Amino acid sequence: MLPIPKPRAMAGIAACFTVLLLAGCASKPTIHVDSDRNVDFSRYHTYGWQTQPDVPVPLMRQRLMDGIDARLQAKGWRRVTNGEVVVVAHVATQQQQTLTTMYDGGPYAGWGWRTPGFGTATTYVDTYETGTLVVDLFDAASKRAIWRGTARAVMPENPDKGNALLEQSLDGMFADFPPGTAAKSK
């Protein structure tokens, strides 16, 4: 028979589980892509930036622009001052919290169990930051939105992991760009 962990050990296990869960979230962004189905993307060959992305870290701003440039240029598009398509990108961040409550006491003590009448409860608060990257493409002549890619993830504190997350997000957004490419190649 396996030994039953003490309530304090259970609290540590739950805290570790929460940290691992959040770390797992940080490694994979949630990506969504949408486009105007009436637009023929094969007619576009040039693009330009409306303004530099609103990103608080200058190195990350440059990596974001370089990453988008590389993906559009890999599709045969050329960056010019007044392109046929205008690129707009920004990042929004928000703090999130998770609460984990541990119950202490009684034969069923531990995570998620509560014994009526005695014992104590301890709640742990884990604060983390989520970020959403939004990349919009507009037809320069009509000023209409033609494509949008978004990626949302838990923001890592380590810059190397942040760079990897940015690359993974852009790869996911531009995987089937321009729209209709995946259907034509199948």
Image (cartoon, helix red, strand yellow):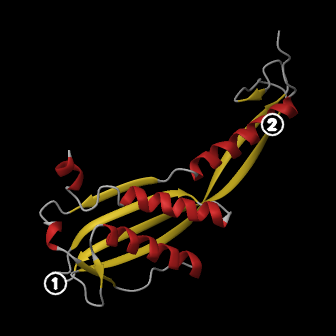
Q: Is residue 57 visible?
A: no
Q: Position of residue 32 (x, y in %)?
A: 36, 55
Q: Mark 2 is on which residue type?
A: Ala
Eye-nearest disc, 2 or 1: 1
- The image quadrant of residue 174 is bottom left
Quick one: 59 or 1, which is closer to the camera?
Answer: 59
Q: Say above or below: 153 vs 139.
A: above
**Secondary structure type for disc 2:** helix
Does residue 155 appear anywhere in the picture?
yes
Residue 63, above or below 80: above
The residue labelled by disc 1 is 141
SS for dot 1: loop
Q: Amino acid at mark 1?
A: Ala
Front residue of this view, candidates 116 and 162? 162
State the quadrant of the C terminus. Answer: top left
How far apart are the alpha carbons under marks 2 and 1?
59 Å
Q: Residues within 10 Å of mark 1 (few under 14, many from 20)?
A: few
Residue reaching furthest to the top? 1
| Residue linked to disc 2 | 11
User: Image check: 68 left or right of 26?
Assistant: left
Q: Position of residue 76 (x, y in %)?
A: 27, 71
Residue 119: % across, % down: 84, 29
User: Could you tell me which residue is drawn at 85 percent across and 32 percent down?
Assistant: 9
- Which disc number belongs to residue 54? none
Q: Residue at x 59, y 53 (%)?
A: 26
Position of the N terminus by quadrant: top right
